[in-house]
Amino acid sequence: MSDVVNTPETIPALQLRGVTKTYKQGEPGEIAVLKGVDLTIQPGEIVALVAPSGAGKSTLLHIAGLLDGADAGQVSICGEDMQGRSDRKRTRVRRDQLGFVYQFHHLLPEFTALENIVLPLLANGVPKPEAEARALSLLDSVGVKPRADHRPAAMSGGEQQRVAFCRAMANEPRVLLADEPTGNLDPATSDRVFDALVRLVRETGLCALIATHNLELAQRMDRRVALEDGHLRAL
Ligand code: ADP
């Protein structure tokens, strides 16, 4: 056996080590939501995060997504520990390496599907023709290209959510974080939309941490972790 060397293939896309988070609330005072969370996700892996409501899924995703800081522990993105780094650095990593999908799509209502995907690309300095070509190709890969010129209100819930996936992937992140991404869709639509998400993740080779209540969807991911009493355990 050769020694393990840190080639790009062995650097985890996302790694949490000993992450803790306690919120201060009126009475009884404090609530320890994360008590030492360890999680390592390699590039290309899709991991389901399963937990009942209130267990701390959103807290965990916010910390992994650098939207909030942990009290202690390490959060590494592509091998770089982000705890204690400047806001500027965290914002840059968030913009360049992380993609987010929420339960509700949060698309901008006054813009078309295409424009919603193009905007973050333009903000990152991608020239407009290239941005539009990339947005159309993303829409095509999730079967929503015919809706490119529609505003969100003129699309179904499943179409809106697929556009939101495309937007999250527009800047070619290394890590996708999703909080109940099909939670507000009916089961049949949820199934199709989830397939589109998995295909997109597989095509781009990024890693994904996807919170879901849906155990059937969780079974279709590479592996599952449950958040219980502040710790993660493999399911
Ligand atoms: P989930 O996403 O699994 O439903 P959350 O991460 O939203 O769970 O919340 C976990 C616990 O932490 C809940 O008891 C919630 O009330 C509490 N909590 C979440 N955010 C805050 C906050 N900003 N301040 C105080 N308590 C919070």
Image (tube, rainbow, N blue to C red):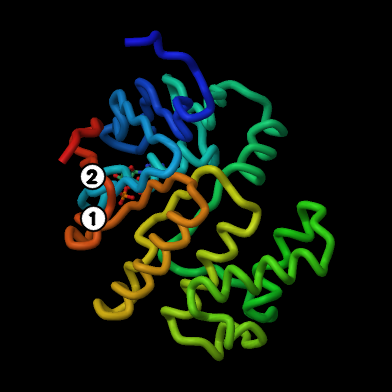
What is the three-letter code of the residue carrying label 2? Arg
Circle 2 is placed at which residue position? 224
Q: If you read the primary sequence from the N terminus, does the residue marked by circle 2 or circle 1 appear first?
A: 1
Callout 2: helix, strand or loop?
A: strand
Quarter occupied by residue 229 = top left
Query: Cα distance, mark 2 to mark 1?
Result: 7 Å
Q: Picture coordinates of residue 86 (x, y %)?
A: 68, 26
Q: Are marks 2 and 1 in contact (CB under 8 Å)?
A: yes
| Residue at the limit of the structure toward the bottom, as seen here | 154
| Residue at the limit of the structure toward the front, as seen here | 1
Which residue is at 56% across, 65% downward?
166
Which residue is at 45% across, 29% downward?
12
Give the quarter the ligand 1 occupies: top left
Circle 1 is placed at which residue position? 218
Point out which mark residue 17 bears: none
Q: Nearer the viewer, residue 27 or 195?
A: 195
- 9 with respect to 1 (left or right): right
Vertical comparison of 132 with 198: above or below: below
Which residue is at 38% across, 72% downward?
193
Q: Nearer the viewer, residue 16 or 4?
A: 4
Q: Picture coordinates of residue 198 (x, y %)?
A: 38, 60
What is the three-letter code of the residue carrying label 1? Ala
Q: Residues within 10 Å of mark 1 (few under 14, many from 20)?
A: many
Quarter occupied by residue 112 = bottom right
Q: Picture coordinates of residue 210 (x, y %)?
A: 36, 52
